[in-house]
Image (cartoon, rainbow, N blue to C red):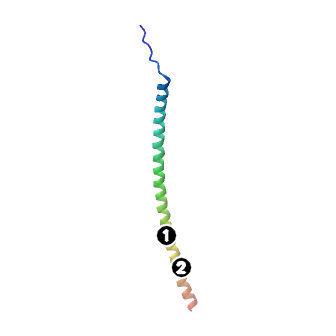
Amino acid sequence: MPRKKKSVTPTEQVGFRLSSHEKVCAERMKTLFKAIDEMRKDIKDLRTDMNKGKGAVNVLIFFAGLAGAIIGFFKWSN
């Protein structure tokens, strides 16, 4: 006697589709969160580098001003 195939109701099909869709969406969300965390880290590193660059430029401007003042003092004092 042949076995009867178990019929799947439409609500069970929808439930299966939703659960598999939710799994795919959860994986995508994990990937997005990971990418956002990496971008935050990169932005923090860029800000740190930018602040170091600003400091270096400020030091160079200070030394250039100091050198200009010294040269000007000796040039016009004679």
The reply to whether discs 2 and 1 touch (Cβ–Cβ < 8 Å) is no
* Amino acid type shown at disc 1: Ala
**Residue 71: image location, x then y, percent:** 55, 84
Q: How much space separates mark 2 and mark 1, taking CA atoms?
A: 14 Å
In percent of the image, x 48 and y 38: which residue is there?
25
Name, please, the residue furthest toward the bottom. Answer: 78
Q: In front: 51, or 17?
A: 17
Q: Residue furthest right?
A: 76
Which residue shows up at 54% across the image and 83% down it? 69
Question: Quick one: label 2, few (<14), some, or many (20+) residues within 10 Å?
Answer: few
Please, what secondary structure does the residue beneath circle 1 have? helix
Residue that badge 1 annotates: 56
Image mark for residue 65:
2
Q: Nearer the viewer, residue 51 or 26?
A: 26
Query: Could you tell me which quadrant the N terminus lies in?
Result: top left
Q: Residue furthest top?
A: 1
In this view, the residue in front, 53 or 32, is: 32
